[in-house]
Amino acid sequence: MEALYSTIHYWLVTHPIITNFQWKQGSTFGASPLFLTLAVLTYLTLTFSFDHFPLLPPLSPTALRLISAVHNLILCLLSLIMAVGCSLSAVHQMPKNDWTWVICFPANHTLPRGPVFFWAYIFYFSKILEFVDTLLIILSGSRTRRLSFLHVYHHAVVVVMCYLWLSSSQTLFPVALVTNASVHVLMYAYYFLCTLGVRPWWKRLVTDFQIIQFVFSFLISGLMLFYHFTGSGCSGIQGWCFNAVFNASLLALFLDFHSKNYAKKRKALDKNKLS
């Protein structure tokens, strides 16, 4: 068991590529406002074009299921690796077992380097990979049911959020990364099984856990603000402000989605029971 842990720890934390990682603005691939802007604008432009004009060749249901299965499996496994990798890296990188570091990076003393920031970098590009979610919805022909404002807004803005994590050495992001990646393990596992013809029972839990994730982020942010205002300050607080506003907007949209999709179903079931 110890040998297994050592192997996992090496490949997810102390491997030279991971432990020596450093985000260098304008030098590291993807570390520029231009790259970020082009990525988001390309996503929005292609989404609008493919959604309104038949520019893509049709795919057979079998081919679409195969592509969807591979995509969902990759993101499920990648999310699991990111959650484990960032958790182990946070424990490894924090100074002298100081758990407050996970919640509040010291202001003006935290450079975006080391294994924790490596996983933030991987997470950043995983959100670009998730753009394929939108393409698969459009190709499936079910976009009138599933391609919502919430979906497009979330996919576009979350990339900006991840960029700010790295460029500002944003405090509290390890907690956000681990919780978000953990929820995505469940979500993409659900989608993967659906492509195989299995309908897991936990569909509603995916939305419930996403809402819990946002509520938890606000609670833990309260602790971070306590450290920020009673100590020497936390790093990347401007980036955190953007993150907080974004999470608040997502929470409102998810609550609206939850009420529209599940409250109505519950009312319909209640009516059927009475009839």
Image: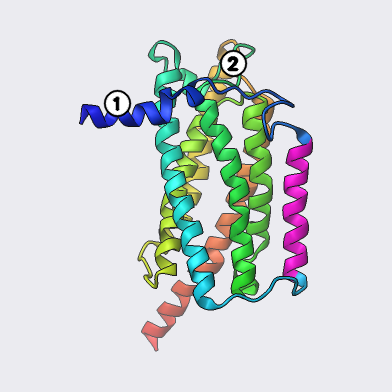
Q: Secondary structure at mark 1?
A: helix
Left or right relative to 233: residue 214: left
Task: Confirm whether the magenta stretch covers residue 89.
Answer: no
Residue in view at x 77 percent, y 34 percent: 33
Magenta stretch bounds: 34-51
Disc 2 residue type (three-letter): Thr
Which labelled disc corresponds to residue 181? none
> In what quadrant of the picture does the N terminus appear?
top left
Name the residue tied to disc 1.
6
Left or right relative to 67: residue 30: right
Task: Confirm whether the magenta stretch covers residue 48.
Answer: yes
Q: Secondary structure at mark 2?
A: loop
> Looking at the image, is 138 positioned above or below residue 231?
below
Name the residue tied to disc 2.
110
Q: Are marks 2 and 1 in contact (CB under 8 Å)?
A: no
Instruction: Report how far apart the C-alphas of labels 2 and 1 lie in the structure.
Output: 27 Å
Disc 1 residue type (three-letter): Ser
Left or right relative to 125: residue 79: left
| Magenta highlight: main SS | helix
Q: How far across and down, in percent of the image, does residue 225 sit? A: 57, 24
Would residue 275 be seen by someone viewing this image from the given angle?
yes
